[in-house]
Amino acid sequence: MSFVIKDFSTGYDSKQIIHSLNLVLKNNEWLGIIGANGSGKSTFLKGIGRILKPFSGSAIIGNKNIHVWSTKDIAKEISFLPQIQNNNLQLTVYEFVCLGRSPYKEWWNWDLNNYDKSIVLKSLKATELYNLQDSLICNLSGGQRQRAFLALALAQEPQTLLLDEPTTFLDINYQIKFLNLLKRLKNEQRLSIITVIHDINLALRFCDRIAILKNGKILALDKPKKILTKELIKEAFGVEISLINTPIGLQICILD
């Protein structure tokens, strides 16, 4: 199902950050959100992820506004991975990923049935954590911990993943590995993904479409090759660039 965001506005308390955004996330599409600091990227993601309440407009899946769904029901459709995560959890990887089944359980019965367990194991294998399932979350490396949070998200069996700067604290090697993993899971599980991402070249490399935000509004939205022009980057980030064709496709070089 498509994820339709219509005239959507949100922010903090009485301060509006996002102003009447409109976009449609297609089924099995990866949309990258880029923009300068303060452009509203994370605020937008928190708004459509129900972390923040909307000021106006709607976010619709299957002809139903997600802001009227119950928390459990929306967690079966959308999974949100925040930028800052708790690194000191005294849980094993298996126990942690089991939490992803909570939308399907009642408060008085947290026992996992055979189907729940199969989904947890599937998520561990998909994120290459099966052999680390008995390790504590707090003892994992940054890349492993990021995969554990992704495994928890997958255990919810969502149709849409929202990720807020998932590669920020990873080195170059783990950034590429994590985004390649996302790409594989997107194709295998037919997921739709919205990713806030700082590195424009990573957005170019992995996203199907890119939205550039400026002052809480969409400056441009299109396929990477069409959107990342020298003029748009100058307007959005205030820098001059050169566009370079590489073995992995179009990339940019910052000139000043």
Image (tube, rainbow, N blue to C red):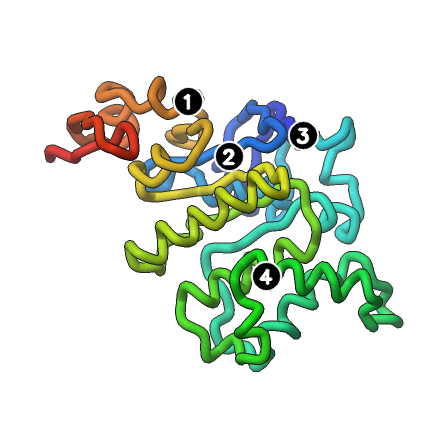
Q: Residues within 10 Å of mark 3 (few under 14, many from 20)?
A: many
Distance in Å between CA atoms under marks 2 and 3: 21 Å
User: Disc 3 vs disc 4: which is toward the camera?
Assistant: 4
Q: Residues within 10 Å of mark 4 (few under 14, many from 20)?
A: some
Is residue 182 shown above or below 221? below
Query: Horizontal and vertical percent for residue 178?
Result: 43, 53
Side of 68 relative to 92 (left or right): right
Pointer 2: what residue? 30
Which amino acid, by three-letter code, is at mark 4?
Answer: Lys
Pointer 3: what residue? 58
Tell me what residue is drawn at x 82 percent, y 66 percent: 114
User: Disc 4 vs disc 2: which is toward the camera?
Assistant: 4
Distance in Å between CA atoms under marks 4 and 1: 32 Å
Pointer 4: what residue? 125
Q: Residues within 10 Å of mark 1 (few under 14, many from 20)?
A: some
Side of 240 relative to 26 (left or right): left
Pointer 1: what residue? 223
Find residue 232 and name its label.
none
Of the image marks 4 and 1, the number of the one nearer the N terminus: 4
Side of 114 relative to 20 (left or right): right
